[in-house]
Image: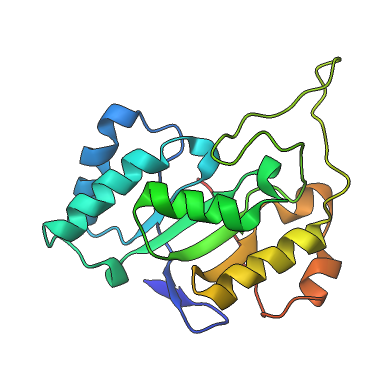
Amino acid sequence: MAITLNNGFKMPIIGLGVWRMDESNIRDLIINAIKIGYRHIDCAADYRNEAEVGEALAEAFSTGLVKREDLFITTKLWNSDHGHVLEACKDSLKKLQLDYLDLYLVHFPVATKHTGVGTTDSALDADGVLEIDTTISLETTWHAMEDLVSMGLVRSIGIRYVGILNPCEHSIRSSKFSTKFIIVTL
């Protein structure tokens, strides 16, 4: 079963999340999940296993287990990369061994101090408090996400954890694309 997104793409309603998956088991878990019918794989830069997921996906494609267009791959932009959206997306694509993402989400709607593309460390100040980067607005991040769609790197975009810090209304109102996502994690 799938839902049709505002842009016409179909997203399977059940996906395999790879958060906290042991890197040594990812290959077998993904291959077996595909064999039993999973078509949505949910990843994130912060899960720190995109390269292992990419190896499993490459194997699934090269062996003919599934075609790329039959899978829906989601990954997420980490907080410290809000000012480096294009670079972070390309890094995820490289690790996942993909030409495009079906869905790219802003993991949290808050920018933190940049720690380097490809890393998801969180910068803390001397008191151990997370360093928020107030120079990067959510609207700026959102427009950079829209650019990824225009470049063909991403088919759909969204924001995860919308209600935590703000309703993101201004960013959505100023967007080029009509986008609505409800993400439920079980």
Q: Which residue is rendered at x = 41% and y = 43% of the image?
A: 50
Q: Position of residue 65 (x, y in %)?
A: 14, 60
State the image coordinates of residue 182 (x, y, percent, origin top left).
Answer: 61, 63
Instruction: Please indicate, yes or no, whether residue 86 appears anywhere in the rendered image.
Output: yes
| Residue in front for this viewpoint, 5 or 57 | 57
The structure residue drawn at horizontal position 34% and vertical position 53%, both measured from the top left corner, is 97
Q: Residue at x 21, y 39 (%)?
A: 28
Q: In this view, does 111 lie to the left or right of 18?
A: right
As drawn, is 14 to the left or to the right of 5? Answer: left
Which residue in the rendered view is the most extreme toward the left?
A: 63
Give the image quarter of residue 132: top right
Which of the colour schemes (rainbow, by chain, secondary structure, one colour) is used? rainbow
Looking at the image, which is closer to me, 149 or 1?
149
Query: Residue at the bottom extreme?
Result: 8
Res. 16 in view: no
Where 38 sits versus 131, above or below?
A: below
Picture coordinates of residue 179, whole percent (x, y): 65, 74
Left or right relative to 144: residue 97: left
Quadrant that contains the N terminus: bottom left
Q: Identify whether 68 is placed above or below 118.
A: below
Counting every numbered tag in the picture gives 0
Q: In this view, does 78 lie above or below 179?
A: above
User: In this rendering, would 121 be left or right of 162?
Assistant: left
Please give the name of the residue rendered at 71% of the width and 38% of the height, measured from the top-left corner. 114
- Residue 17 at x, y percent in the picture: 42, 46
